[in-house]
Image (cartoon, rainbow, N blue to C red):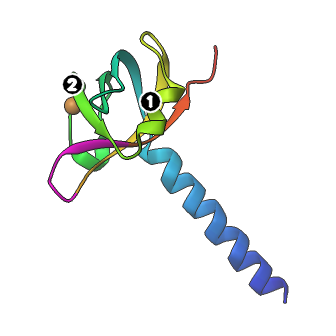
Amino acid sequence: MMKRVFAALLAAVLAASAFAQALTEGEVRKVDKAAGKITLKHGEIKNLDMPPMTMVFGVKDKALLDKVRKGDRIKFAADKNAAGEMIVTAVEAQAKK
Ligand SMILES: [Cu+2]
């Protein structure tokens, strides 16, 4: 019984930390809601093997663009979609220092 609870907890912690590691810091340079695009100055994106740069991303869901404004410092997850385009799949605000 305890073993099963522990295994479930461990799985949840591992999943959470994997997600946290996938987040990249970025700064919003431009939001284009009509086109569903966002321009980010981003840090290294490890899962895409991409160095820091400023570039345009698509978004998985246009509703993500309602959460951000030009100048915001964010953390985000990015991935390639089926067409090979870089898209932002999740966004959260950076913790205030
Ligand atoms: Cu890039």
Tell me which segment is drawn in magenta.
82-88
Taking the image as four quarters, which one is ligand 1 found in? top left
Quadrant (top left/top right/bottom left/bottom right) for the N terminus: bottom right
Q: Residue at x 40, y 18 (%)?
A: 27
Q: Which mark is residue 46?
A: none
Q: Which residue is mark 2?
A: 55
Q: Is residue 85 magenta?
A: yes
Q: Position of residue 44 (x, y in %)?
A: 29, 32
> Which residue was labeled with disc 1?
65
- Asked whether, in this view, residue 65 is left or right of residue 17, the answer is left
Decide which of 21, 87 is in the foreground and name it.
87
Q: Is mark 2 within 8 Å of ligand 1?
A: yes
Counting from the top left corner in percent of width and height, residue 11 is at 62, 71
Give the farthest residue toward the top. 71
Residue 84 relative to residue 94: left or right: left
Viewer-side residue, 88 vs 95: 88
Amino acid under label 1?
Leu
Q: Is residue 11 above or below residue 96?
A: below
Residue 56 quadrant: top left
Q: Which residue is drawn at the image coordinates 21% and 25% (left, top)?
A: 55
* Left or right: 20, with 58 as reference point: right
Categorize mark 2 by other alpha carbons within 10 Å: few (<14), some (14-19), many (20+).
few
Find numbered disc 1 in the image and state the secondary structure of the residue it sits on: helix
Does 80 lie within the magenta span?
no
Residue type (three-letter) at the residue carrying disc 2:
Met
Q: CA distance from mark 2 to mark 1?
A: 16 Å
In-image side of 68 versus 31 (left or right): right
Residue depicted at x 39% and y 18%? 28
